[in-house]
Image (cartoon, rainbow, N blue to C red):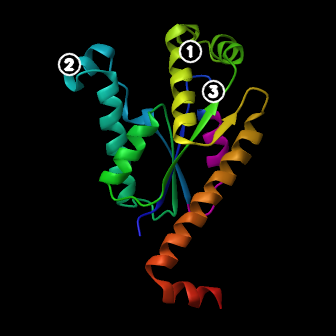
Amino acid sequence: MTPAILVVTGASGSGKTAAVRALDARALPGVRCYYFDTVGVPSREEMDRDFGGGEQWQAVTTQRWLDRFATDPDGAEVYVLEGQTRPSFVNRAAERACIGVARVVLLDCAPPVRHTRLTELRGQAELSNPRMDGWAAYLRGQADALDLPVVDTTSLGIDAVADALAVHIENVRAELQAAAEQANPADGATRRR
């Protein structure tokens, strides 16, 4: 069985990086956390030249991450990937990488809160713009259309968001266990004794 994947997505300022870092610090058994942008984010010009645009770079990079997780580089049960990517890219990449359990959870917040986080807390006022608002709305629409779980971080502290993510990890872990038992019914019966 390949490991389970939980992708934590959201617009800039939604709290995803801080929450996944807090989750990572908990050192949950069998869980490894990764950050989408650690592979390096090319400039817009490089994305256009080398990939045909930002959307295509995002799709290719999502596929590369899930291909990597399919090889289970850390011997983990669940890999958590934090990053801004479309849920449809995750679903497509999981299918191509033959990953049976891959889920997406969206972190979202009210636009004024996102603006405050980006401008006052992170010092990245350039990210608080109509484009980011549109991206956040798009992700929320995708979550609604695909019936994905959404954690509203508007009034939650980082630890509370990490708690919510821990619940999602346990859900994918249970789903992975059920898939393993279905694939090997004798193993599941032995474990239940």
Q: Which residue is tagged 1?
A: 133
Q: Amino acid at mark 3?
A: Ser
Q: Amino acid at mark 1?
A: Asp
Labels 1 and 2: the sequence-earlier one: 2
**Of 23 and 107, the residue lying toward us:** 107
Give me the residue at 63% from left, 17% from top.
122
Labels 2 and 3: the sequence-earlier one: 3
Q: Residue furthest left?
A: 49
Mark 2 neighbour class, 10 Å CA radius: few under 14, some 14 to 19, many 20 or more: few
Task: For mark 3, give the secondary structure.
Answer: loop
> Is 91 above or below relative to 154?
below
Task: For mark 2, give the secondary structure.
Answer: helix
Give me the residue at 62% from left, 40% from top.
21
115 vs 65, left or right, is right
Q: Amino acid at mark 2?
A: Arg
User: Does residue 28 belong to the magenta stretch?
Assistant: yes
How far is disc 1 from disc 2 in space, using C-alphas? Answer: 26 Å
How far is disc 2 from disc 3 in space, using C-alphas? Answer: 29 Å
Give the residues drawn in magenta, as a range.
18-30
Q: Which residue is tagged 2?
A: 49
Q: Nearer the viewer, mark 1 or mark 2?
A: 1
> Is 31 above or below relative to 135?
below
146 vs 109, left or right, is left
User: Does residue 134 belong to the magenta stretch?
Assistant: no
In percent of width and height, residue 99 lies at 39, 58
Give me the residue at 56% from left, 22% from top.
136
Q: Main secondary structure of the magenta part?
A: helix
Mark 3 neighbour class, 10 Å CA radius: few under 14, some 14 to 19, many 20 or more: many
Q: Which residue is tagged 3?
A: 14
Tell me if I can see residue 94 in this picture.
yes
